[in-house]
Amino acid sequence: MKRSITILGATGSIGLNTLDVVRRHPQRFSVHALTASTSVESLAELCREFLPRFAVMSNPDSAKALSLALSDCPHIKVLSGKEGLCDVAGDPESDTVMAAIVGAAGLPPTLSAVRAGKRVLLANKEALVMSGRLFMDAVAESGAELLPIDSEHNAIFQCMPADKIRDTRGAGITRILLTASGGPFRTFSAESLRSVLPEQACSHPNWSMGQKISVDSATLMNKGLELIEACWLFNTTPDFVEVHVHPESIIHSMVEYADGSVLAQLGSPDMRTPIANGLAWPERIDAGVAPLDLFQIGKFHFERPDTERFPCLRLAAEAYQQGGTAPAVLNAANEEAVAAFLDGKLCFADIAVIIERTLEQVEVVPAESFDVIFSKDAEARIIAREQIALLSAIQD
Ligand code: NDP
Ligand code: MG
């Protein structure tokens, strides 16, 4: 049976890689809906190629522009706003949703797909970090099939027995070894981290990704978010997950068993591998990925992460331990700080300062409902922006 796929964030790095895999298998996959925020031309072009039933722009003006651009394609219905995103994500006509919007904006439509009981391919880690238990409860309630697309979590998933991914101890697993590239500034001194530029932060040594996750990789916040993501996906705790910096990015993560075995998933650093794994699971399909040449790679290296130079990893682990709304606050403050850094308004090393100050100022409460999460997200953004303005006033 053909899978009918909706891609949230189709114009982004994950979205385009997903469409590249889909393009290779026209007999297996059809495209039900594509969404973007403001990239009208790019979404119009994708619509002409993949002929979805729906195209959604979260930005209403962009939706009008897309309607105009597709006026000769009457079979494609253009929707707009958060409602449009949630409608297509939960539409019973499609069975699989790729959640690849960046940041907190992805939570409502991803949740809509979860509640509709779909196969949800989760790239949008921020959605899970923000709402952890509530998100996983929604998955359990609806029977949605949640498959990890983040390369590390997909690797861990591949190294576990499929029926025991939420029962690691029952599976005889003793540790998860979460690998990290270390980012472009792995070897930089604390002093030189103050003057790095957005262009440097966005040029990752091994992966080609969107701007926000590239900066997260450079601060190690990405690993912090992934630590939290692993705890929720695999029903475990941070003490069970050990971060290993592995600059080659060939081992995508490992799982250690009680008998001393360590299973690893290796591959070229190319997101089409985990995407194809999620799309076709439990089958394997061609993803267009270059075969691994271990002779050329030659050596693997491992280091402990340095949380002195990269405090974001520590802040994320602490927020998870604190629980309640703390991870949502961490995530919101990080999104604001990263946006300010990309905008030239904050220095790289101050991203962590903003997050720490915001966590100190926003009261943590139990994460009882999604409304509580969204209101803490909004509160944290106000505080983070105030702190960013304060810091830039001091520096001017
Ligand atoms: P990109 O920035 O490349 O793409 C983001 C996508 O989301 C675009 O389609 C963008 O549309 C859309 N979008 C942005 N803001 C909004 C909004 N407010 N409302 C609705 N849609 C929006 O990001 P990536 O593809 O790199 O990352 C996507 C997610 O996947 C992130 O959560 C990231 O952490 C995760 N991920 C990414 C990996 C990668 O290799 N890139 C690896 C592992 C996880 P538009 O083009 O119009 O702006
Ligand atoms: Mg990752």
Image: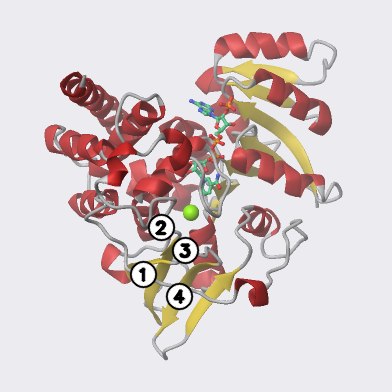
Of helix, strand and loop, which one carries label 2? Answer: loop
Which sits earlier in the primary sequence, circle 2 or circle 3? 2
x 25%, y 41%: residue = 352
Residue indicated by mark 3: 247
Amino acid on which the number 1 mark rests in the picture: Glu
- The tag on residue 255 is 4
**Viewer-nearest residue: 87 or 150:** 150
Instruction: Work out whether mark 3 precedes mark 1 in sequence or the reverse, and give the earlier one.
Output: 3
Instruction: Tell me residue 8's x, y (percent).
Output: 59, 34
Pick the quarter of the image with the C terminus: top left
Q: Name the residue under label 1.
A: 303
Residue at 67%, 10% (x, y): give it: 65
Task: Give 161 or 215, whichever is nearer the viewer.
Answer: 215
Q: Is residue 220 left or right of residue 368?
A: right
- Tell me the number on the disc at residue 182: 2
Is there CB contact under 8 Å for labels 3 and 1? yes
Dot 2 or dot 4, earlier in sequence: 2
Label 3: how many Cα within 10 Å (few below 14, some 14–19, many 20+): many
Q: Contact, CB < 8 Å: mark 1 with mark 2?
A: yes
User: Compared with residue 42, is residue 68 higher up or lower down, i.e. above or below?
Assistant: above
* Mark 1 neighbour density, 10 Å: few (under 14) some (14–19) many (20 or more): some
